Structure formats: C-alpha cells, structure tokens
C-alpha cells in the first residue's frame, strides 16, 4: 500500500473503511441493547467525532436526541496552561442520560474535563462512546463504556481526525510513518 502525504508527513493505511464500519456497527448495536429505555442525549464532540457520530447514529435505532459541542481552548493569563470548556451545549442535561461521542481517548485528560462538566451541569447517567482508544496512553481514571477500536500510541489521521486541519475527510485510518 502506497503511503499518502499530508503536509510534511507520510502516512500508511492502517484501518480500512470496511473494518471501521463493522466496529461502529458493533458499538451501535450494544447501545441499542443497553440504552433502549434511557431516552439518551448523544453529545458529539466536534470536530473530530463528526464522522463516527454520523455512522453511529445510523445504527442507533432507539428513541434519542443528538447534539453537538466543541471545546474552547484558550491560553489564559494563568501559568497552568490551556483551559478547556464545553461550548455550544444549548440543551439542559439535568436528569438526562447522556452519551458522549468522541473520536479518540488518548491520555483521557479531555474526556475527564467533559465528564466533570456534564456532572456539574446535572446529568444523570453519563456514558462514553469513543471511536478509538489508545489504552497505553491513558493517564486518567475514567470509565469508557464503548470503544469501537483500540490502537497503539501512534499518531493517526482520517475518519474525522486531522493532521493540522487536513485528512479529516479520509474514509480509512492512516498511521504516521516516522
Ligand atoms: P486526550 O485529552 O485524551 O489526551 O486527547 C484527546 C484528543 O487528542 C483527541 O480528541 C484528539 O483531538 C487528539 N488526539 C489524540 N491522539 C490523536 C491522534 O493519533 N491523531 C489525531 N489526529 N488526534 C489525536
Ligand atoms: Mg476529540
């Protein structure tokens, strides 16, 4: 398989579209079984999870709502570094059973922030569905309920995930060559 080039890096095909679709179907079917009577609110974390959320929600066939959030990332005046907050959540999550739909859980820092914020906003059950997880990189004690695929701790692009803004539109997953 020929490498593809994005900006200054080469990437090699590592997960095919067909394998992705199969894994996403498994997650969707598990959610249909587990959350059928929970009236869940799915919360898709943009930008990276847009493709996973689109495919997942075509498999999910239980009564549910879906909404979209972003994480604001800004460098404040604090030496502690970037602060991330949820933006764009217009729906009340008070008493709701929610499913956070993410592209990838790497160290778990981002997901820990999201979960803390949803808890503070009064969500009832909080579930996590991530397309990818890098188990070796996990540094936070968070519960990830649904994982479509586990991968090694290498940088990947495609299926919604980008390298410097590019590569999100690839239907397969590619791993960086170094
Ligand atoms: P965490 O906070 O779990 O360390 O990182 C989560 C975020 O890091 C993801 O939402 C994603 O934006 C980014 N990320 C982690 N690993 C990768 C990767 O291999 N490729 C890309 N494109 N983004 C990644
Ligand atoms: Mg993400």
Image (cartoon, helix red, strand yellow):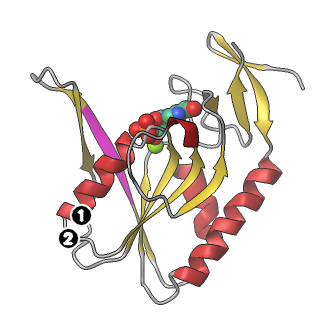
Q: Residue furthest bottom?
A: 37
Residue 101 is situated, as x and y percent measured from the top left of the image, at 48, 58
| Cβ–Cβ under 8 Å for marks 2 and 1 | yes
Q: Secondary structure at mark 2?
A: loop
Q: CA distance from mark 2 to mark 1?
A: 5 Å
Q: Nearer the viewer, residue 13 or 120?
A: 120
Q: Kindly indicate the quadrant of the structure image that contains residue 117.
A: bottom left
Q: Main secondary structure of the magenta part?
A: strand
Q: Secondary structure at mark 1?
A: helix
Q: Residue furthest left?
A: 77
Q: Residue at x 30, y 77 (%)?
A: 96
Residue 113 is situated, as x and y percent measured from the top left of the image, at 29, 47
Bounds of the magenta segment: 68-73
Is residue 59 shown left or right of residue 118?
Answer: right
Q: Residue at x 72, y 31 (%)?
A: 174
Q: Residue at x 43, y 47 (%)?
A: 46
Q: Is residue 61 visible?
A: no
Q: Nearer the viewer, residue 101 or 5?
A: 101
| Residue annotated with mark 2 | 122
| Residue annotated with mark 1 | 119
Residue 128, label in figure: none
Q: Kindly indicate the quadrant of the structure image that contains residue 2.
A: top right
Q: Is residue 17 visible?
A: yes
Up/down of 30 relative to 2, above or below: below
Is residue 173 shown left or right of residue 144?
Answer: right
Up/down of 74 relative to 143, above or below: above
Circle 2 packing at 10 Å, graded few (<14), some (14-19), many (20+), is: few
Q: Residue furthest top?
A: 8
Label 1 CB sits under 8 Å from any ligand 1 atom: no
């Amino acid at each position: 398989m020929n490498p593809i080039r994005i900006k200054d890096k080469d990437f090699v095909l590592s997960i095919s579209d067909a394998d992705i679709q199969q894994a996403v179907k498994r997650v969707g079917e598990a959610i249909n079984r587990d959350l059928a009577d929970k009236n869940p609110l799915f919360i898709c974390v943009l930008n990276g999870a847009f493709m996973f959320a689109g495919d997942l929600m075509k498999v999910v066939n239980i009564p549910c709502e879906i909404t979209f959030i972003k994480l604001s990332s800004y460098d404040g005046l604090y030496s502690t570094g970037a602060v991330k907050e949820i933006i764009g959540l217009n729906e009340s999550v008070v008493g709701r059973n929610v499913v956070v739909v993410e592209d990838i859980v790497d160290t778990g820092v981002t997901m820990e922030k999201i979960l803390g914020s949803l808890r503070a906003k009064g969500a009832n059950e909080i579930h996590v569905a991530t397309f990818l997880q890098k188990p070796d990189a996990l540094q936070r004690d968070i519960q990830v309920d649904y994982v479509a695929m586990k991968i090694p701790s290498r940088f990947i692009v495609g299926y919604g995930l980008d390298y410097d803004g590019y590569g999100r539109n690839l239907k397969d997953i590619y791993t960086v060559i170094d």
